[in-house]
Amino acid sequence: MVEPTSHSDATRLNASPSLGVFVGRQREMAGLRTVLDDAISGQGRLVMLTGEPGIGKTRVAQELAGAAESQGMRVFWGRCYEGLGAPPFWPWVRWTQSATPLWDAN
């Protein structure tokens, strides 16, 4: 997460009216908000959300992204694809491609 936010795919994803109320996960979100605060203060962090399909990893990520954007941070998304043929490191490639214009502008 870097620099001031603008309307992005993440913003549209977080603004989805179908998300409903977020319940549970207080412990996880508290830890993630601590990591977010560290990142905002300049201490870089990497967080990996892992678990079985359908347990709420994407929703937790959306909630964290919303918290980051509400503090003026820009959010970038990388997604993994199941199945054969996905290029190595694909989420990182996509993230780098979406962030590169920011670095070029500076």
Image (cartoon, rainbow, N blue to C red):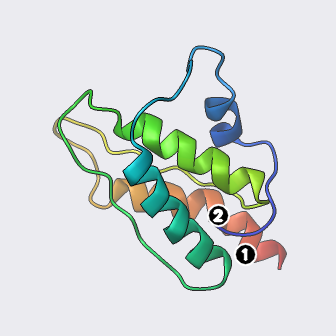
Residue 88 x/y as whole percent: 26, 59
Secondary structure, mark 2, is helix
Secondary structure, mark 1, is helix
Q: Is residue 2 left or right of residue 65?
A: right
Residue 102 x/y as whole percent: 75, 68
Q: Is residue 62 left or right of residue 4?
A: left
Which residue of the protein is positioned furthest toward the top in this rendering? 18
Q: Is residue 34 left or right of residue 49?
A: right
Q: Residue at x 51, y 29 (%)?
A: 22
Q: Residue at x 69, y 28 (%)?
A: 15
State the image quarter where residue 104 is shown: bottom right
Q: Residue at x 16, y 39 (%)?
A: 84
> Badge 2: how crowded within 10 Å, few (<14), some, or many (20+)?
some
Gap between marks 1 and 2 measured at Cα = 7 Å
State the image quarter where residue 3 is shown: bottom right
Relative to 82, residue 45 above or below: below
Q: Residue at x 40, y 35 (%)?
A: 24
> Badge 1: how crowded within 10 Å, few (<14), some, or many (20+)?
few
Q: Nearer the viewer, residue 26 or 60?
A: 26
Q: How many marks?
A: 2
Q: Are marks 1 and 2 in contact (CB under 8 Å)?
A: yes
Q: Amino acid at mark 1?
A: Trp
State the image quarter where residue 90 is shown: bottom left
Q: Which residue is mark 2?
A: 99
Task: Using the image, tell me which numbered label, if any, was put on residue 1.
Answer: none
Q: Which residue is mark 1?
A: 103
Q: Nearer the viewer, residue 99 or 19?
A: 19
Quick one: quadrant of the N terminus?
Answer: bottom right
Quick one: quadrant of the C terminus?
Answer: bottom right
Q: Amino acid at mark 2?
A: Ala
Residue 70 x/y as whole percent: 76, 51
